[in-house]
Image: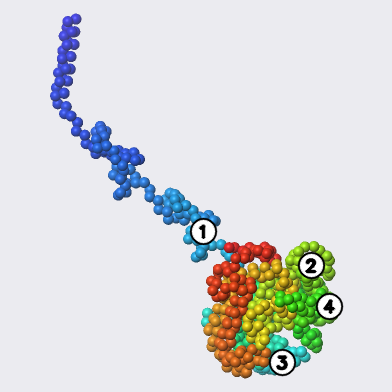
Amino acid sequence: MKRVQRIAAMLVCSALAFSFVACAHDAPHDHSYTQWEHDEEQHWLVCPDDGAIDPAGKSAHDFTEGDCVCGQPAPHVHSYTKWEHDEEQHWLVCPDDGAIDPAGKSAHDFTEGDCVCGEEAPVDARAEAYAFRPVISKDMPAVYIETDDGSFDFVTKPNLDMKHQDQVNYVGATVSVYGYGEEQSYSLTAKAQVKARGNYTINYEKKPIRIKFEKKQSVLGLNGGAKYKSWVLLADWKDLSMSNNTMAFYFGKTILGSDGYYSSDYRNVEVYINNQYWGMYLLVEQQEAKGGENGRSSVPEVEDDYTGTDIGYFVEYDGYYTDERNMPNNAGDPTFELNYNNYARLTRLNNTTFDPREGTIGYTIKNDIYPEGYSANHPQIKFIQSYLNNAYKIAYEAVYNRRMYKFNDDYTGIQSTSGSPKDVVSAVIDVQSLVDTYILNEIACDADISWSSFYLSVDMTAGGSKKVIFEAPWDFDSAFGIKNGVANNAQGMFAANSSNPWLVLLVRESWFRDMVTAKWAELVQYGVLRTALELVEEQKATFADQYRANLQRWPNRLNGDVELLPEINSYRTQGEAADYLERWLHNRLNYLNTQWGDGTDVLAQPAGEAAAAVSLCEAEVCLVGEERKIVR
């Protein structure tokens, strides 16, 4: 037992001795704070040996040089450089993480076109509708006419008496058309027939010409490149500026064309006959019933030998109708007369009244009819005569007597109905076409408007509107204030105080005047009026050499015309006459702007800026056949 106690005591003593020796050699730990630790907001140093924290404590991260020295990644700095958008708004986002710019969202800005964000500017359908511009190039195309017999008789001998005797005949020819400059690759050569044309104008030394190709041809891309057999070369003899017709056709293509109604396309050309220079002409389309895409009216061509009355009718209000009727061999256009609601008197805008017979009661039919030839009992002639008499009566009774009628089911008679005058009239007349035609004629002040060259159409086919449509403006060589005693000061209302019953019929109705005002606002808004004035000057400068050559070819034109204003007859150059046109037209447009617009100078109104506060959809004018949307 004692032996065991001694061994235990010896072990305890050995352990104590070992402990004392170890303590004598263990020095205190010296911390080295070299290891970074951190959280999201702060960092600190610790001793890597035992994790002791640096007494200096914790401090905020420093991202001056990017990631913090402790290893904490620098927070992302957003760069809002990427656009995102929907249909109405746009906003900037950071391309790295899609964070949205705190500036928020804003509406698109189409001031300069497409928005900066990439959203495409909405298409302004009305701006596109008014986008027509004529081709005006110093490199004028040329038309060469080579007659088969080498004779010039077809274009030198005819006169109005010969036409009345059916002695103005076609002659065979080869017609070539060449482009120059940017159009130098264009050429056309085709067999055709040619003849002098016109009524009073056929008496002039320089005569208008009709071309009838053997096969349909597209000429210089006119009317969208449409192919037709018949084309016309207007001589522009009476009008020394040679710009009246181009100006009227420009207004036709914009005022009527913007609403889908037909007006001839046009192009200035130089004409050579049997290799002799014949002067500067205006190439235009023949007035005829050939509707459809790029058509020449709103009515389709009549099928050969079709004798039904459900066809397209294209007619001219024509003071020369008796000349057509009396031509031998039934050679004239078919004709008929209207009685204008038993010649009931109309009241002009100036409160004077007139009998519609002060204008003309006669009409000529420009579409084909079958069987061919005039006869008082011809079914198609009798139908359109009856239809127009009834359509006129319906409109007259509605606006003058507030008695409402409508057509019966087969359009051969009328019966009582109810409704507003506007609704009743709109059921038989395409009122927007009349608004457009009225405005054009108020601008142009055409001296012949109560006599002839005033066109309308009616589509009685299965898909036709069966309404009277006014379109195809024509013959303005006596317009724009050049005829002595006719609107020479460019003031006052003209068409509304004429003796053309169709133009006067609705002018006293407030709803019709509202439609006129709304249409005028569009013409100002889309720069049509300003552009018209600019075109006169552009043509004068661009075609100076051709105008000069034309007068050298036809020096007798400077002898004047008994119908013209003495001031016009005193001019010796096209430039002088063009300056008159520009002054007169400027004054005329400014006058009409006092009647229908805000009264300011039309040249002071920037193109594309709305000039009137009136809404284009007020007075229900947005309906033209089908709803017309206007993008603002």
Mark 2 or mark 4: name the one nearer the start of the chain: 4
Q: Residue at x 17, y 17 (%)?
A: 15
Q: Amino acid at mark 1?
A: His
How far from the left and from the top, in percent, is residue 203?
A: 70, 91
Query: In what element is the residue under mark 3?
Result: loop
Q: Nearer the viewer, mark 1 or mark 4?
A: 1
Mark 1 or mark 3: name the one nearer the start of the chain: 1
Q: Quickly name the residue at label 2.
A: 402
Q: Amino acid at mark 2?
A: Arg
Is the C terminus in the top left, top right, bottom left or bottom right quadrant?
Answer: bottom right
Q: Quickly name the residue at label 1.
A: 108
Q: Quickly name the residue at label 4.
A: 378
Mark 4 or mark 3: name the one nearer the start of the chain: 3
Whole-angstrom CA distance, mark 2 to mark 3, is 48 Å
Query: In what element is the residue under mark 4?
Result: loop
Q: Amino acid at mark 3?
A: Asn
* Image: 569 above or below 404: below
Q: Nearer the viewer, mark 2 or mark 4?
A: 2
* Image: 32 above or below 138: above
Q: Judge left or right: residue 304 versus residue 210.
A: right
Mark 2 or mark 1: name the one nearer the start of the chain: 1
Q: Residue furthest top?
A: 1
* Image: 605 above or below 57: below
